């Protein structure tokens, strides 16, 4: 049986938490957005933070 690390192909990040200032996002949260392959966002996601996503990242609206 494969281990989790062997099966891992990418990262998914859920972006939510309220329409606040993206400057209030933690350093780890910003790094997660910058490195994610897929971002799941709802209507409360700080929309300006999506600019940090990689150009090839898939952004899915799950609202």
Image (cartoon, rainbow, N blue to C red):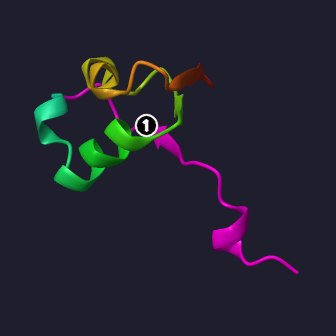
Please name whichever residue, 50 or 21, is drawn nearer the observer in this view of the structure: 50
Please name whichever residue, 52 or 63, is drawn nearer the observer in this view of the structure: 52
Q: Position of residue 42 (x, y in %)?
A: 51, 26
Residue under the point 17% across and 51% down: 27
* Range covered by the magenta-colored residues: 1-20
Residue under the point 58% across and 20% down: 61
Q: Position of residue 47 (x, y in %)?
A: 33, 18
Q: Secondary structure at mark 1?
A: strand
Number of residue marks: 1
Q: Which residue is mark 1?
A: 15
Q: Is residue 8 magenta?
A: yes
Image quadrant assignment for residue 62: top right
Please name whichever residue, 62 or 10, is drawn nearer the observer in this view of the structure: 10
Q: Position of residue 17 (x, y in %)?
A: 37, 39
Q: Main secondary structure of the magenta part?
A: loop
Outermost residue toward the right? 1
Badge 1 density bin: few <14, some 14–19, many ≥20, Cα 10 Å: many
Image quadrant assignment for residue 53: top left
Residue under the point 52% across and 36% down: 37
Give the quarter of the figure containing the C terminus: top right
- Is residue 9 placed above or below 16 in the rendered structure? below
- Is residue 35 placed above or below 57 in the rendered structure? below
- Determine whether, in the image, residue 41 is placed left or right of residue 50: right
- Determine whether, in the image, residue 55 is placed left or right of residue 22: right
Give the quarter of the figure containing the N terminus: bottom right
């Amino acid at each position: 049986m494969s281990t989790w690390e062997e099966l891992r192909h990418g990262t998914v990040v859920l972006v939510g938490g309220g329409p606040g200032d993206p400057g209030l996002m933690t350093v780890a949260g910003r790094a997660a957005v910058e490195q994610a392959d897929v971002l799941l966002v709802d209507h409360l996601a700080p929309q300006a933070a999506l600019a940090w996503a990689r150009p090839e990242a898939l952004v899915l609206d799950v609202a």
